[in-house]
Amino acid sequence: MKQGEIKKTVRKRYADIAKGESSCCRPTSSCCGNLNVVEDISKSIGYTDEEIKMVPEGANLGLGCGNPVAIATLKAGETILDLGSGAGFDCFLAANAVGKDGKVIGVDMTPEMIDKARENARKGNYKNVEFRLGEIENIPAADSSVDCVISNCVINLAPEKGRVFKETFRVLKPGGRLMVSDIVVTKELPEFIRNSLAAYVGCIAGALMKEEYLQTIRDAGFKEVRVIDEQLFPIDAIANDPTAQAIIDKRHVSQEGLEEIGNSVLSIKVEGKKSG
């Protein structure tokens, strides 16, 4: 698959989500749909009731695969960067953690998501959050300018993951840290999934092997890279994703085959540090 085609497809998919015209890589009723379903999904991946209720309505689209803010040990006064910030859910949680003397920068390549996030910031009167349009392979931030980079189920969508982590390393201050949630696999996915744009934007085809993902972070310069937590990515998230389902139906994948694929897909939380 060509990188330009992947980015174009991903951008369109998440623009549709921002406008409420499509679902994400979770069950079809979750994104921009039933609020209770969105909240249930958020709780299942690590968000508390308090966190869910403290952000502006419309900020939580049920798009993540973990809660990076919960593990990021954010401190008052820090500058935080969120890669693939969407409608701003994690940014607003981070903003509450760093306080008025801190700053949060959200980066997203989809104009519709940026517009939605900025509107949510206005609704919530967040003065310490800024949203920037840009690609995470070319982060619109200065060298050594942030204390912590977070990301939630987004880097797996980037065609050049190595470049993303090198850019992340660049913008972090010495002693800064990376804290991300993402999707990886423990064995190679079937070729028909790996080569499908639909499965790519559905959070499946773009996933690296677990050890390859961790080594890519190390190769970017990070030290003390470790998996803090991991769990199987729910099979219903794959089965109910409309793009993945279309592929599965076309290829006549059995329930057993689907379960085998599901048992190889993990949601992991990873941290890494930039030497001081």
Image: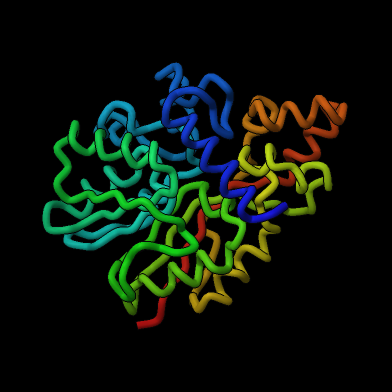
Side of 84 where 216 appears, left or right: right
Q: Which of the pair 191/187 is nearer the observer?
A: 191
Q: Position of residue 230 (x, y in %)?
A: 58, 50
Side of 75 where 23 appears, left or right: right
Q: Quadrant of residue 208?
A: bottom right
Q: Residue at x 18, y 58 (%)?
A: 102
In the image, residue 133 sits, relative to residue 24, either above or below, namely below
Q: Position of residue 228 (x, y in %)?
A: 51, 58
Side of 53 where 47 appears, left or right: right
Image colouring: rainbow
Q: Residue at x 57, y 30 (%)?
A: 26
Q: Is residue 47 visible?
A: yes
In the image, residue 52 sits, relative to residue 90, either above or below, namely above
Q: Residue at x 29, y 59 (%)?
A: 80
Q: Quadrant of residue 251?
A: top right
Residue found at the very far bottom of the displayed protein: 276
Image quarter in which the C terminus is found = bottom left
Q: Residue at x 72, y 27 (%)?
A: 245
Q: How many marks?
A: 0
Q: Position of residue 92 (x, y in %)?
A: 27, 43
In the image, residue 256 sits, relative to residue 114, either above or below, namely above
Q: Position of residue 246 (x, y in %)?
A: 74, 27
Q: Is residue 230 visible?
A: no
Q: Which of the pair 127/231 is nearer the observer?
A: 127
